[in-house]
Amino acid sequence: MPKRSLNPDAIAAAALALGDRDGQAAMSMRRIAAELACDPMAIYRHFPNREALLDAVADLALAGVVTDRSADVGTGPGAAVRAGASPGFEWEGRLIALLSDVREAALRHPGIAGHIASRPPLGPNGLRLHRVLTEALVAAGLSRADVAKATQALIAYLAAALAMAVRAGERDERWHQVGKALELEVDSAQLPIVGSAEQFAFGLRLLVNGIRVEGQRG
């Protein structure tokens, strides 16, 4: 493989493509260096450590998230979530679209989705998305202090949802055991798959409803 011109953007792009192809296990400095046909030490000239490189890759993975989606429900996996916004509450649409689209974008990149869950990106794209999140919460009527608290809660929910989504795909037998032990009046087979878009939609709707109530309290 011919050597590529090394710069932070090129390294991050190569690492993202490698993770897309071979998954999270491939995201080592040695594997990334092999993808770039360079010595691993060459990467350290641009990133002080692996975590800093993965931070850049995570931020790049969110580059395609569109932030002006308040009137666009769309047709992707998150469409049902976005459609859950209440009529007349534009901030809800922006908030739901943002978090749904971030989740979808992260899951399109299996090599870095787990890192996004553990360390929300703070690069240019992460900060751009954070501004949209803050604006939506201010529009909801929250005080500055509550905006900070709500941001923390939403990011924690998104991070946990991403971590579960990485392992999603089968119904969790433990939930069957929990439902039986607590005598829940619901068939566990009817519960959403842990980490699924359906589960994310329901939880996000609960959070948004709570934010609306807090905003109306003034």
Image (cartoon, grey):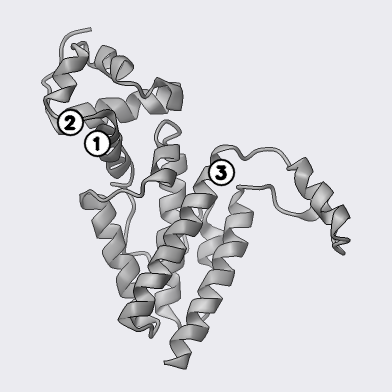
Residue 34, horizontal then vertical, whole percent: 27, 12
**Disc 3 designates what residue?**
165
**How far separated are the C-alphas under marks 3 and 1?**
24 Å
Frontmost of labels 3 and 1 is: 1
Residue 193 visible here? yes
In contact (CB < 8 Å): disc 1 and disc 2: yes
Tell me the crowding category of disc 3: few under 14, some 14 to 19, or many 20 or more residues within 10 angstroms, Cα based: many
The disc, 3 or 2, on the residue closer to the chain's N-terminal end is 2
| Callout 3 secondary element | helix
Q: Residue at x 50, y 47 (%)?
A: 162
Name the residue carrying label 2.
Answer: 47
- Above or below, 188 against 147 in this view is above
Q: Is residue 58 above or below residue 160?
A: above
Q: Which of pointers 3 and 1 lies earlier in the amino acid sequence? A: 1
Mark 1, secondary structure of its residue: helix
Which of the image's four quarters has the N terminus? top left
On the image, numbered disc 1 is attached to which residue? 52
Secondary structure of residue under mark 2: loop
